[in-house]
Image (spheres, grey):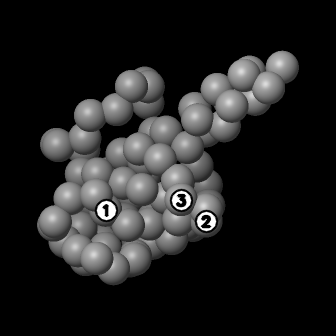
Amino acid sequence: MQNNRQTNSFQFFCGRAIVDEAIEPGKRGRVRFRGSFWFACCNSPVTLHPGTAVRVVGRNKGTLLVDPISTAQFPCAG
C-alpha cells in the first residue's frame, strides 16, 4: 500500500504548469498547476516569464520544481 501511495504522490507532482509570476535563477516565482497556485523554482539558469509553459518535475516541501518544456526530461505523461 505504501508504494502505491508514493507512486500516486509522484504522479500528482508531475505534469504541465503555466508561470503566473516570473521565476528567476535562484529565486522563487509562482505557477498555476492543476487548478491551484504554487510557489515554484526552476532547475535551469533561465528566467521564466508569465505565460510560459513548464513541466513540474518534482516538489520540495511546498515549492514545485519546474523546467522549461523545451528542456524538460521527465518520466510521466501529461
Position of residue 61 measured from the top left corner of the image (x, y, whole percent):
61, 62
Identify the amino acid type marked 1: Cys
Above or below, 59 against 38 in this view is above
**Inter-mark Cα distance, 1 to 3:** 12 Å
Tell whether label 3 touches label 1 (CB within 8 Å).
no
Does residue 76 appear anywhere in the picture?
yes
Residue depicted at 38% across the width and 67% down the height:
41
Which residue lies under the disc numbered 1?
42
The residue singled out by tag 2 in the image is 62
| Vertical arrangement, residue 48 with respect to residue 24, above or below | above
> Pointer 3: what residue?
60
Q: Could you tell which of marks 1 and 2 lies nearer the N-terminus? A: 1
Q: Residues within 10 Å of mark 1 (few under 14, many from 20)?
A: many
Give the spatial CA distance, label 3 vs label 2.
6 Å
The amino acid beneath tag 3 is: Asn
| Residue at position x 42%, y 47% in the image | 56
Dot 3 lies on which element? strand
Is the residue 22 above or below the residue 66 in the image? below
Q: Residue reaching furthest front?
A: 2
